[in-house]
Image (tube, rainbow, N blue to C red):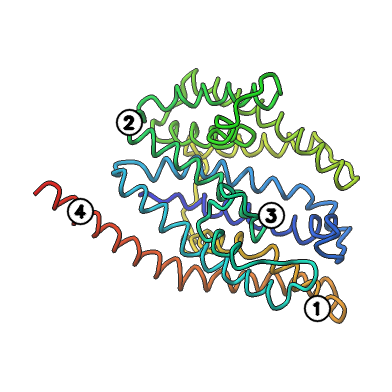
Amino acid sequence: MNRLILLDLLRFFAAFAVVLYHYTFDGYMSSVVTMLNFQELGSIFQYGNLGVELFFMISGFVILLSTENKTISYFVISRITRLYPAFWVAVTLTTLIITFYGGEVFDVTSYQYLINLTMINEVFHVRNIDGVYWTLFVEIRFYFLIFLLMLFRQMKFLKFYLLIWSLISILYNSNFIIFPNLINFFLFQNVAPFFIAGSIFYLTYRNNKFICLDYLTLLLSFISAIMFLNQQTLHIEKAFNIQYNMLIIISIVIFFYFLFYFISKKIVTIKRDKKVYMIMGGVTYPLYLIHTYIGYIIFNNMSSFINKYILLFGTILLMLLVSYSIHILIEKKLGKYMKKKMLQLVDKITFRIKK
């Protein structure tokens, strides 16, 4: 799979925006999580939650890239070994920190820990050990949709399905139609526009051209995305009793779309310091997984005797170091080992069936 270095940089940017959103805004505004207040920074980084939407756009692009000239078994194994090793470590580490240092704010049970290891704990109505894990279940459902298209050899009609999906998403986010829960579950229409946009941008990147259908699907996805973000913003404003500027949110989303447009047209590229950006991209997933609750617990246990800005900087630095260790020791070693062994197992099974 060809690697787009710029996407590594975007991943890191998205993750870091989410980290700053949680540490300087969401943690304090939630009040029950941490009382450490960064009001000056929070007013800026309250928009950092849009890093999640950027993640989803990147996923739409990258997942399709990972399917090119690959078998279904390779796709499934590559996704499993990409997501689970670092996730297992993050869930275990977060559970241990909560158990010993969570105090009265955080709690976890053995059953919750074991079910969380599956990454599909929401199916069993088991609460996420860390709040950010909800996005992983969305990712898995997107992988499943791509898996079905590959299984039934429908990838050649992907643009048509993306157009239909964007229409369904608009109807859902406009509250025009109430869809059955099963459709809502598998199509996750609220954040679907970002996956759709990322997918369209990848297809235009691969084909090296835009057609009218692409522009139509992108326009519909953008409209649906703004509908969803408007609803989400109203919810946050009500919950936290604050004000957001919707024009800023719209401007940021427009920036995302134009950035991916330039990437798909190969106008924006990175040719220098590739190793640095690959490392930044590598630490992104572990950083996203471990930063939230562990960071809040550090704040709660150390804010009484350490300056809050020193604590903020130190916690971010610690999260980066731990994330880098997980990336090197778990993702690059255990993940690759698992992938190798699983592919070998599939080859053996396939050989015996053919024999």
- Residue topped by disc 2: 152
Q: Which mark is residue 349?
A: 4
Q: Looking at the image, which residue sits at the far bottom? A: 305
Disc 4 marks a residue whose amino acid type is Ile
Looking at the image, is mark 3 or mark 1 earlier in the sequence?
3
* Residue 158 in which image quadrant: top left
Q: Which mark is residue 18?
A: 3
- Per the image, label 3 sits on a secondary structure element best described as helix
Circle 1: element type: helix
Q: Nearer the viewer, mark 2 or mark 4?
A: 4
Does residue 89 lie above or below 59 as drawn? below
Q: CA distance from mark 2 to mark 4?
A: 21 Å
Task: Evaluate if marks 2 and 4 touch, with contact meaning CB atoms under 8 Å apart.
Answer: no
Label 3 CA crowd tier, 10 Å (few <14, some 14–19, many 20+): many
Q: Secondary structure at mark 4?
A: helix
Residue hosting label 1: 302
Does residue 90 sit above or below 125 in this rendering?
below
